[in-house]
Amino acid sequence: MRRTSVFLVIAAMVSASCSPSPQQSATPATPAADAASEEGKQLSALAPANLAKPRPKPPFEVTGNWFIDVSQNPEAWRFGPPYPKLTPAAQVHWDAAKKYTAEGKVYRDDIGQCWPAGLPLIMTRYWPMAMVQIPTAIYMISGFMNSVRIVYLDGRKHTDPDIIVRTYNGESIGTWEGDTLVVDTIGFRGDHHWMDQGGVAIPAGEQLHIVERFRMAGNQLEIEYTMTDPQHWEGEWKSTKRFNRVIDEDIQEVSCLPDLNEHLQSTTSKTQVLQ
Amino acid sequence: MKRLLGAWALVLACGVPVLAHHSPAAFDRSKEVKLVGTVKEFRWQNPHTWIEVLVPDEKGKEVLWGVELTSPTYLIRAGWKSNTIKPGDKVTVTVNPVRSGEPAGIFRSLTLAEGRVLTERPARLGTADSK
């Protein structure tokens, strides 16, 4: 009985110290919070007021599950060959990958070590990509590690470079040009980010800029890629991919769990060259 | 006749492209290793299912082999279930081994004690005609 009383007193003290007082909870919103609702502030792509804005009907909808068309070429997931002329900064990695591959080793397979695939490779993994299109954005979730990519369609501009948070899929802004959706992506992470895998090593850097032109080609989704990264290659690297609609599978929860590679011994074997 | 248990045979394999979450370059697609042993663990999960098999070597010492498979999505299409094998089952598993010589490989086929043979399906979804 006495022990119960002590417990109740302690519980009351903890509750009092953790809960906001009536005065605290009545504190007005901060100026920053006020600004979020001010006219002109970028609304979330999911804000009802943004969704409700009048917009022209889009030329097509990409909502669906998509899978890279490898029916003619199982290597169609790669964005080369042809590959662009590499800079010395990239050539060193290309050469190292060729050397180690010839020795039966795997050079810098960061995806295999659970780093994100990132754009562009995330689009052509051998897992379906779920796309959900709403008036303000296209939400993409890859069946590969459930990587999320958002293409904003609500007229916003790219984030100020001084505050953008660099990511492996970057920041994507889409605009409609006739029957084509043009998606401009910047803001990439430049470490552990690669343009290819499996014997071909070309780094993707912070200057990577990808323009994708989405079109519907019959029942297929066609995306024409134009990619530049002056740190790693000269000029424009172009590649066109077609994707098939998947109607009998949904994406699933997929994670690179902490014990995954412990049981996929090839990823921790002596074949791996990690640095 | 050489005792099969604990022995592995190298034969030519036809190259079948399989994309894992990692580079497939670690595996020697020109070789097949036949593992005759006992299932230690079978994990039915994304992105890869895997099997650990205890395989006696030439001296009778048990060696733990790791076998990497594709995702359940494709295994289901090839007739697999989460209970197709369980710890303690006697199995024969054929793999393409890693090039380093370590006891690991990527899956080619499984023969159950009852004689049923299971493989994988190519990792491919959708067709150009899908609407």
Image (cartoon, helix red, strand yellow):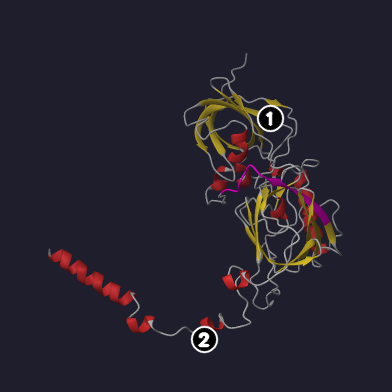
When asked about the image quadrant of residue B65, the answer is top right
- Residue projecting furthest to the top: B1
The local crowd at label 1, few if under 14, some if 14 to 19, many if 20 or more residues have their Cα within 10 Å, is many
Instruction: Specify start and end residues of the magenta stretch as a single range.
Output: A239-252
User: Magenta stretch: residue A244 in it?
Assistant: yes
**SS of the residue at dot 2?**
helix
User: Magenta stretch: residue B2 in it?
Assistant: no
- Residue projecting furthest to the left: A1
**SS of the residue at dot 1?**
strand
> A137 or A235: nearer the eye?
A137
Residue type at mark 1: give it.
Answer: Glu
Q: Position of residue A198 (x, y in %)?
A: 73, 48
Chain letter behind tag 1: B
When asked about the image quadrant of residue A6, the answer is bottom left
Q: Position of residue A253 (x, y in %)?
A: 55, 50
Q: Position of residue A241 (x, y in %)?
A: 79, 52
Is A46 displayed left or right of A9 in the figure?
right
Answer yes or no: do the residues labelled 1 and 2 have beta carbons within 8 Å? no
**Quarter holding the C terminus of chain B?**
top right
**Quarter holding the N terminus of chain B?**
top right
Chain letter behind tag 2: A
Q: Which mark is residue A31?
A: 2
Is A167 displayed left or right of A28 in the figure?
right
What residue is rendered at 63% in x and 82% in y? A40
User: Residue A78: in sight, yes or no?
Assistant: no
Residue type at mark 2: give it.
Answer: Pro
The vertical placement of B13 against A92, above or below, is above
What residue is rendered at 59% in x and 73% in y? A49
Q: Which mark is residue B32?
A: 1
